[in-house]
Image: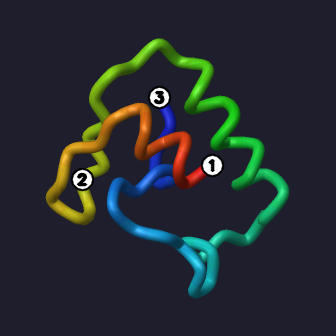
Amino acid sequence: MVVDVLYPGWVPFKNLAVSQDIPGWLRAHDTAMRYPWRTLVGGHLGRLGTRADGHLQQ
C-alpha cells in the first residue's frame, strides 16, 4: 500500500504534497508504479486514476 503519494488530476507543485522528505517522496512514486495496479483510488480529490495518471505525476 502506498498512501498520499499519487493524486490523479493534480500536480503537486505547491509544497510537494507537504512532504518532509522530498527524495523519499520521489522514490515512493517508483515504489507505487512497481505494483501491478490498474485503478488508483486516491481518496482526496474524488477522481479515480489510471496508470497513465501515475506515470504523468512521476
What is the quadrant of residue 16 in the picture? bottom right
What is the quadrant of residue 14 in the picture? bottom right
- Label 1 sits on a secondary structure element that is loop
Name the residue that disc number 1 marks: 58
Residue name at image x 41 percent, y 45 percent: 53
Residue extending furthest toward the right? 23
Q: Nearer the viewer, mark 2 or mark 1?
A: 1
> Do the CB atoms of the residues marked 2 and 1 lie less than 8 Å apart?
no
Name the residue that disc number 3 marks: 1
Name the residue that disc number 2 marks: 43
Give me the disc on residue 20: none
- Label 3 sits on a secondary structure element that is loop
Residue name at image x 23 percent, y 65 percent: 45
Sooner in the amino-acid sequence: mark 2 or mark 3: 3
What percent of the width, then of the height, locates residue 12? 53, 73
What percent of the width, then of the height, locates residue 26? 74, 52
